[in-house]
């Protein structure tokens, strides 16, 4: 991890690692990999959303209000 853990944080992570059947070091490395993979997936979703941004169809109430605001 990029920052040092306090004693309480280290104890908490050690319990989680023991529950998962891993050593603390392996647990922290796996946790960092998962965090990086999640960030990459989020970035990929955002990039694809920017490229192919299709405007959403107006909802039911938006269409209803638009009809009501039209002059007769």
Image (tube, rainbow, N blue to C red):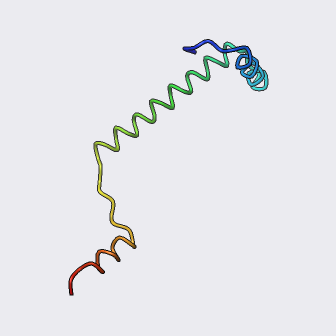
Please name the residue shown 65% across and 15% down the image: 5
Q: Is residue 15 above or below residue 72?
A: above
Question: Would you identify the image quadrant in which residue 51 lies?
Answer: top left
Please name the residue shown 70% across and 20% down the image: 9
Question: Would you identify the image quadrant in which residue 48 lies?
Answer: top left
- Quadrant for the C terminus in the image: bottom left
- Residue 28 in percent (x, y) is at 64, 18
3 displayed left or right of 69: right
6 displayed left or right of 70: right
2 displayed left or right of 40: right
- Quadrant for the N terminus in the image: top right
- Residue 29 in percent (x, y) is at 61, 17
Q: Is residue 71 above or below residue 43?
A: below
Q: Residue furthest bottom?
A: 72
- Residue 43 in percent (x, y) is at 40, 34
- Residue 10 in percent (x, y) is at 71, 16
Q: Is residue 23 above or below residue 61?
A: above
Please name the residue shown 44% across and 30% down the image: 40
The residue nearer to you, when weighing 8 against 36, is 8
Tally the numbered discs: 0
The residue nearer to you, when weighing 65 against 35, is 65
Question: Would you identify the image quadrant in which residue 33 lies?
Answer: top right
């Amino acid at each position: 991890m990029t920052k040092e853990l306090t004693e309480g944080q280290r104890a908490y992570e050690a319990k989680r690692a023991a529950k998962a059947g891993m050593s603390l070091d392996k647990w922290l490395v796996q946790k960092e990999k998962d965090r990086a993979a999640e960030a990459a997936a989020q970035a990929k979703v955002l990039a694809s959303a920017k490229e192919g941004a299709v405007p959403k169809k107006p909802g039911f109430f938006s269409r209803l209000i638009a009809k009501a605001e039209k002059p007769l």
